[in-house]
Image: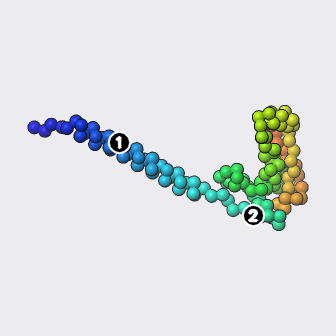
Amino acid sequence: MFKPNIGRTALLCTALVVGLIAGTIGFSSAKADTLSDQIKAPVYKKNANGQTYGSALYAPTPETEPDLIQAEDENGTVGYVLKTELEGPTPKTPEEATELMRKTPKVRKINLYASDGKTVIGTFKIKQGHVINASDDN
């Protein structure tokens, strides 16, 4: 008659579970590396000043956004805003952040440029952290 060896069975089951977990983790890591490699920043055009320009829609990270980001003003004029103007100043301390929030107007206006980054063609408005579309009420 057959008598199962419980110790041996437990050891084999443990080894199987550990192997499955290790294999799954390894496969997930490899898959994540492959996906991040596939998400590349778009290739942006450059103007005469060496500034990149285009839509930031497909930029995988803020660091890969163009210098001039495509935008549209309330009148439907399509142009570009400087990334640095869009982001505004970066506070270094919580106190600076509080002061900056207190001083920031409810509607902040920045220039809308042609692709040369110099010619102002309109005004782009940002209201309390979001873009004002033509359909928004002021």
In-front residue for pair 114/94: 94
Which one is in front in this view, the residue at disc 1 or the one at disc 2?
Answer: 1
Task: Please report the residue visible at 32 percent of the width from the left and 43 percent of the height from the top.
Answer: 15
The amino acid type, in three-letter code, at marker 1 is Val
Mark 2 — residue?
A: 45
Residue 109 placement, left or right of 53: right
Q: Do the residues labelled 1 and 2 touch (CB within 8 Å)?
A: no
Q: Is 97 or 118 nearer to us in this picture? A: 97
Q: Report x, y in % for residue 42.
A: 67, 59
Say which element carries label 1.
Answer: helix
Quick one: label 1, few (<14), some, or many (20+) residues within 10 Å?
Answer: few
Residue at 63% in and 58% down: 40
Where does label 1 land, which residue?
17
The relative height of residue 26 versus residue 95 in the rendered view (above or below) is below
Q: Earlier in the sequence, mark 1 or mark 2?
A: 1
The C terminus lies in which quarter of the figure? top right
Where residue 41 sits in the image (x, y, percent)?
66, 57
Direction from residue 31 to residue 12 in the image, left or right: left
